Every structure is written in C-alpha cells, then in structure tokens.
Image: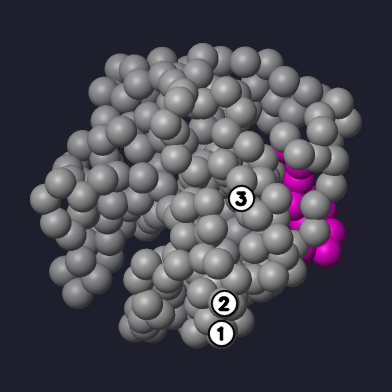
Amino acid sequence: MPTRDTTWPAGTPCWADLAVPDMPKAVEFYSAVLGWSLVDTGEEFGHYHFAQVDGHAAAGVGPTMQEGQPSFWTLYMASDDTDATAKLIADNGGSVIMEPMDVPGAGRMCIAADPAGAVFGVWQSLGMPGAGIYSEPGGIAWEDARLSDVEAGRAFYTAVFGWTYAEIPGLPLSEYGTFHGGGDPLGGLGGLMGAPEGTPSHWIVYFGTADVDAAVAAVEQHGGGVLQGIEDTPYGRMAFVTDPFGAPFALHQAPQG
C-alpha cells in the first residue's frame, strides 16, 4: 500500500479537497463510493473533515463558507515556499485567487488559476504533509489538467513548478501528454478533449477504487451522476462522475495483473 508521512517534493500534486453545502450528505456519499472514514477536525478548523483510508489521510472535505458557493475538487501542488510560488504564478500569466495564508499547525496555502483559467491550490507543509495514501483504492490515483490553451498551460506550469512533458503513444502531444517533475509521470495535461461546448479549463482528480462498476452504482444510489460511463483503457477501467453537489471527479480501477 503506497503511503507517505513526509513532505511531498515541490511541484508534486499532494492533496485535494472539496467544499460542500451539506456535510452529512457528503459523508454518506463518499463513504459509500470510496470507502472513506471522514474525521471532523472540529469547530476551530471550520469542521473540515479528513477523509481517511486505513487511518491514512486521502483528501479533505469541508463546508462551504457562503450560500451558493460552487462545489468542485481543488488539487494542490506541493511547494517549499507558498509566497514565492504565488509570485511565480502572478509573474507568468496566472492569477492568485486567494492570497497565501496560514493553516495553524498544518501549512501555508494559496488558491490560484493558470492562464487558461483552471483553478488549483498550492500547499507548503508545516506539519501536515498532504495525502498519506495514494495510488490505492480511496486514494488519489491520477490527475489531469484539461485546458483551452495547452501550449500556454505547459509554459506556465514549467515556469512555476519546473514540469517537463512527454508523449503518450498514439496521442499527439498537442492533445494530451504526461507531466513530470524529474521522474515518473505525475499526471496528464491536455486539451478539453470532447467536453461539451462552454466547458471551462479545469483540473480533475481521479480516485482509486477496487471495483469501478460498484463505485459507479454507489454514485447513482447516493445522489450523484455519471458524466462519462465506464470505459476500459490500457491504463485501467474508469468513469467520470459527479457527487450530489455537482462536483466532478473520476474513478479509476487499476489494470489487473
């Protein structure tokens, strides 16, 4: 089981969280779909919940701060210095949506958007390293940037996080490729790839599951929806879904054998 209790390298996707208008419904939904145990951190931290798998933190879910706030998963990139990363974001055509702030006893963060408008977070660990389980059922398994301007996106993320890019056999790099921080692929970056007209640029988080068919059935049983049905790929079996609040994410079942 891939687990981690130390700080993630700078530039690596390290955490994902979500704000929802109905915490009890979110607990019911994600427990059923991903097998999470959701632990309330208490009033001091705004009842932010840690989603755990076998005692390891997988992601976070908290209540929305204001009525009508949209729900979507935010992917965070690790940083050794959130303030310096925020400056790089602004200097390279991105925008800082929420200025760097401290999370007492845990870390320093900001929320930003790349030049194409895809929103992401930056996390500097000061006690809470990020995801403690990954590439396992219930953990983050993959992440994609789906951008309206792929070339501008690549240039931006290289300038901010030092990423390099590689082709996937059979796909032109201008359509989709992997991004790297010096070693194995960290995720994918490409165009909007057949998304409905008007779909904004975005990041999407893939969560692992041992049985994607059962997970999709649980999505539908607990008030979510299916954006793109189950599909077998060379990289596993997957589906794109939404939770009851409209937040999209992907489910990924690793190839057998």
Q: Which mark is residue 134?
A: 3
Q: 160 or 110: nearer the eye? A: 160
Q: Nearer the viewer, mark 2 or mark 1?
A: 2
Looking at the rendered structure, the number of numbered marks drawn on it comes to 3
Instruction: Please say whether residue 220 is one of the residues in the magenta stretch.
Output: no
Q: Position of residue 38 (x, y in %)?
A: 33, 50
Q: Which mark is residue 234?
A: none
According to the picture, the residue beneath numbered tag 1 turns out to be 84
Instruction: Count neighbours of disc 1 (C-alpha within 10 A) and say few if under 14, some if 14 to 19, many if 20 or more.
Output: few
Q: Which residues are magenta?
A: 176-185
Q: Nearer the viewer, mark 3 or mark 2?
A: 2
Q: Distance from label 2 to label 1 (Cα)?
A: 11 Å
Q: Position of residue 9 (x, y in %)?
A: 68, 71
> Which residue corresponds to the image point at 11% horizontal and 50% vertical from the top-left?
67
Q: Amino acid at mark 2?
A: Asp
Q: Position of residue 158 (x, y in %)?
A: 72, 65
Local secondary structure at mark 3: loop
Instruction: Please say whether residue 184 is one of the residues in the magenta stretch.
Output: yes
Q: 85 or 242: nearer the eye? A: 85
Instruction: Count neighbours of disc 3 (C-alpha within 10 A) and say few if under 14, some if 14 to 19, many if 20 or more.
Output: many
According to the picture, the residue beneath numbered tag 2 turns out to be 91
229 left or right, relative to 28:
right
> Nearer the N terminus, badge 2 or badge 1?
1
For the residues bearing labels 2 and 1, Cβ distance under 8 angstroms = no
Instruction: Count neighbours of disc 2 (C-alpha within 10 A) and say few if under 14, some if 14 to 19, many if 20 or more.
Output: few
Picture layout, residue 67 above or below residue 98: above
Q: Amino acid at mark 1?
A: Ala
Q: Distance from label 3 to label 2 (Cα)?
A: 32 Å
The quadrant of the rendering that contains the C terminus is top right
Q: Main secondary structure of the magenta part?
A: strand
Local secondary structure at mark 1: helix
